[in-house]
Image: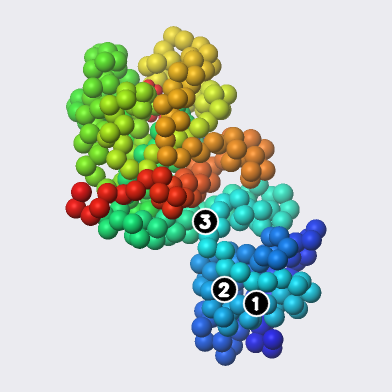
Amino acid sequence: MAAVMLGRNVVLSGVSCGVISSPRGCPDWESSSVRVSLERPGVAALPGSSGRRIAAQPSGRWALRAALKELSVDNDVVALPTRNALQVHKVEKRKSGDDQTGKLSEFESLLEEKSEELSQEVALRSQNGIAIYLIGMMASGKSIVGREVAKALNYKFFDSDNVIESYEGGKPCREIFVLLGETKFRNLETKALQMLSEEKCLVVATGGGAVCKVDNWKYLNGVTVWLDVPVEDLVRRLNKTGTETRPLLSGKCAKSELSRLMRERRPHYAKAHCRLSLKALAENLELTDVGALTPTAIAVQVLEEVKQALQQEKYIPPPSGH
Ligand SMILES: Nc1ncnc2c1ncn2[C@@H]1O[C@H](COP(=O)(O)OP(=O)(O)O)[C@@H](O)[C@H]1O
Ligand SMILES: O=C(O)C1=C[C@@H](OP(=O)(O)O)[C@@H](O)[C@H](O)C1
């Protein structure tokens, strides 16, 4: 037990958190400290990859058990294979009171960790990497979140609207929509998705209506994630940015048109491998509302959902060379 040094030790409403510095003379521990949180009776979670590495080793488990005894907690030590945003958030929340800023900054480091976990999962299943397709209503955050996901994974990012624009000499989508009409716009969208379907190691933000054309699904050649955002939050975002770039809303009441489109499109979006409900995520994280979810927090959850889709074999990457 002398080998283990306890740093902080907080006990809050039956939950204990301690920071244990790496002990001297225990060669298979790395030098960084590890946070131990007792999330439920009998289980000590070891957040982070260093924690998991330590718990995977008998000497690490022994030392942690001893440390927990010193915290007067009779717990076993197990290695949890992963943690999700919610687990981490709960620990952080206990530590920082109800500080939303503290909670959200945690997602910055989680993004790195989650992308590492997903990369490992992908590497087990495919030598070529995968593609991730974000689907959902206009203003659901496909572009802003997609960029973060791509950056974290070191993948390329494409917005299918931008690809369409490149086909038409850089004209904005809204103009293409108006000048050529919706049918031609949709044909260009299919062409863009077909081109992107050849690529791996990329994240694609699809146009809000792309998945309504059944034929387009064969080009969504990867894990599909539906960013499910309540209509009132879409309206809130569009009120900020203006609706000029959204031809489908032109001359209409945004709220009623978005509600109508959502009803019509929901069955198409529901075909995605993963549904990420922002309402549920905000509730789980005990945030005030969907508007408090940063793109980074959402990107963390996208990475987690994609990892689970691979683990549960909802999506099986094609064999190498395909
Ligand atoms: N989680 C978020 N927090 C703050 N602003 C957001 C969030 N998600 C999207 N937005 C804003 O809403 C608008 C639409 O987002 P965008 O990523 O372009 O959506 P989409 O690609 O689905 O149409 C942008 O102005 C963006 O900055
Ligand atoms: O919902 C739609 O049908 C559309 C959404 C837009 O893309 P975003 O979802 O990126 O805004 C764009 O493709 C076009 O205006 C049509």
For the question of whether residue 203 can be seen, the reply is: no
Residue at left 38%, top 53%?
A: 153
Which residue lies at the image location 59% right of the left edge and 88% below the top edge?
Answer: 24
Compared to residue 121, the image places residue 258 above or below, namely: above
* Residue 302, percent from left and from top: 47, 45
Q: Earlier in the sequence, mark 3 or mark 2?
A: 2
Label 3 – label 2 distance at C-alpha: 20 Å
Residue at image mark 2 = 55
Q: Nearer the viewer, mark 1 or mark 3?
A: 1
User: Do tag 2 and tag 1 residues touch (Cβ < 8 Å)?
Assistant: yes
Identify the residue position indicated by label 1 in the image: 64
Q: Residue at x 71, y 71 (%)?
A: 75
Q: Measuring 70% from the left and 80% from the top, which residue is drawn there?
A: 66
Return the x and y of residue 203 as percentages of the image width and height.
Answer: 34, 43
- Chain-order first, disc 2 or disc 1: 2
Front position in the image: 310 or 150: 310
Can you give x and y, in whole percent of width and height, for residue 125 in the image? 33, 57
Q: Secondary structure at mark 1?
A: helix
Q: Is residue 56 above or below residue 317?
A: below
* In the image, farthest residue toward the bottom: 25
